[in-house]
Amino acid sequence: MSEHSDILGDLTLEQLQGGVRLLETQITRAKQEDRTDDAVTYMLTRNAILHEIDVRTEGVVPTPTYAMTITAHHAVQILSVYFPEKTVEGLMRDHEYDIRTMWNERARRGYTVPESALGIEKPVEMYMHSRDWPSMRPISPMGIIHSDGEPALFMNAAPPLNAWWAAEDRVVDRGGDAGEWEMVWREWRGEVIHEGWVQRLERGFMHYLTRYKGGEASPLPLKGF
């Protein structure tokens, strides 16, 4: 933000608003032409201008705040509805394939992102490079990092547990210490980025989901860990 502040301070409100309109056009064109880096640069500049407009018209500086909701992996939640009499251990014993591979319906359709940053079908970036079929293990808790006041919903289409376990294996294989982070998956939907991360604890792992606007910093990895 600071790199733009001196220049933006010399512009009129009308000039700022015109700049937003121009940048929206450039963002759309860059997406259509598969120029992702340019699109992100335009988004950053547009966000800085919108911030300046907010400061002038509202007199406040908007600061994004996040909350964390702890829950279970969505595959466990869904299977528990269908088999309420079973414990998590029973679900893992009797429904191993589903536990490993179940996606939210939106993400399961062809394993592509319906609305990518480029405005076209594009495979999800999911990193399963360590072992082809990670071993079964206890299911880690899920921390959903979301804007304060926003419900913690699984609109992120969280990847299957096999992808999370593969990320855990990558940390273990390189000898990662407690507190180390590893990205599991990232996808764009319009201008919103969705991410999954794992963090190694003293014993086991913690899983995290988040989403944020393109051109903003990801709230993950959490600072101070």
Image (spheres, rainbow, N blue to C red):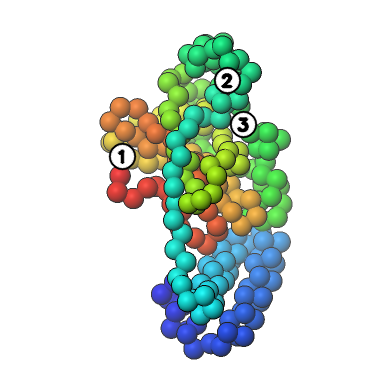
Q: Position of residue 204 (x, y in %)?
A: 35, 27
Name the residue located 45 percent from the left edge and 70 percent from the top edge: 61
Question: Which label number is shown at residue 179?
Answer: 1
Question: Which label number is shown at residue 80?
Answer: 2
Name the residue located 69 percent from the left edge and 50 percent from the top edge: 115
Q: Which numbered disc, 2 or 3, marks the residue that appears first in the sequence?
A: 2
Quarter in which the C terminus is drawn: top left
Quarter in which the N terminus is drawn: bottom left
Is residue 182 positioned above or below 77 on the image?
below
Report, in whole angstroms, how far the alpha carbon at label 1 lies from the one at label 3: 27 Å
Q: Position of residue 130 (x, y in %)?
A: 45, 31
Relative side of 213 to 6, left or right: right
Quarter assignment of residue 140: top left
> Closer to the camera, 100 or 141?
141
> Closer to the camera, 96 or 153?
153
Q: Which residue is mark 3?
A: 103
Q: Which numbered disc, 2 or 1, marks the residue that appears first in the sequence?
A: 2
